[in-house]
Amino acid sequence: TFTEWFTQLGGSRGSLDRMWDPIAYALGFIDCDHISARAMLTIFMLFAIRTEASVLRMLEGSPQTGLHDPIIAYLEERGVKINLKSACRDIVHE
């Protein structure tokens, strides 16, 4: 799985939970514990080497609709409050 591959290279569970799972969900995948590393790495390599990837309709609709909104929804469902017009002075986490 992507999780196994990532943690073998020194990645943390927190990074998976905070960053990689939301990215996988936004791309229409399942969580990193259940998706193959090959699938995740293939899509990221495509974005890395193909500068026109966004033009190829890798996301349905705009990046706001296809990428940002799903990540925002995922975070808000878990109690995260996003304040765009406020400066961040401290990040409090468990």
Image (cartoon, rainbow, N blue to C red):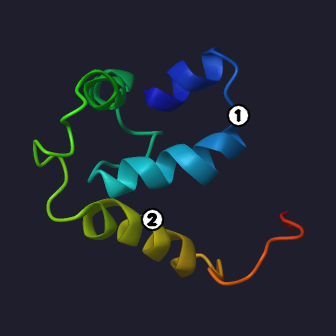
Point 34% across, 26% down: residue: 48
Q: CA distance from mark 1 to mark 2?
A: 20 Å
Point 20% across, 37% down: residue: 53
Q: Position of residue 13 (x, y in %)?
A: 68, 40
**Amino acid under label 2?**
Ile
Residue on which disc 1 sits: 12
Q: Is residue 42 left or right of residue 91?
A: left
Q: Of circles 1 and 2, which is in front?
A: 2
Q: Is residue 16 left or right of residue 56?
A: right
Q: How many marks?
A: 2
Q: Is residue 71 left or right of residue 86?
A: left
Instruction: Characterize the local packing of mark 1: few (<14), some (14-19) or many (20 or more) Cα atoms within 10 angstroms.
Output: few
Q: Position of residue 16 (x, y in %)?
A: 59, 42
Q: Tell me which numbered mark, 1 or 2, is placed earlier along the sequence.
A: 1
Q: Nearer the viewer, residue 53 or 3?
A: 53
Mark identifier at residue 63: none
**Amino acid under label 1?**
Ser
Residue 46, by quadrant, is: top left
Q: Quadrant of the N terminus?
A: top left
Instruction: Characterize the local packing of mark 2: few (<14), some (14-19) or many (20 or more) Cα atoms within 10 angstroms.
Output: many
Point 35% across, 31% down: residue: 40
Q: Image height check: is 15 above or below 9?
A: below
Element under disc 1: loop
Q: Quadrant of the C terminus?
A: bottom right
Q: Position of residue 9 (x, y in %)?
A: 63, 15
Element under disc 2: helix
Residue 62, by quadrant, is: bottom left
| Residue that lies at the very extreme toward the left in this rendered image | 56
| Residue that lies at the very extreme toward the top in this rendered image | 9
Q: Image height check: is 16 above or below 64?
A: above
Residue on which disc 2 sits: 71
Q: Nearer the viewer, residue 25 or 71?
A: 71
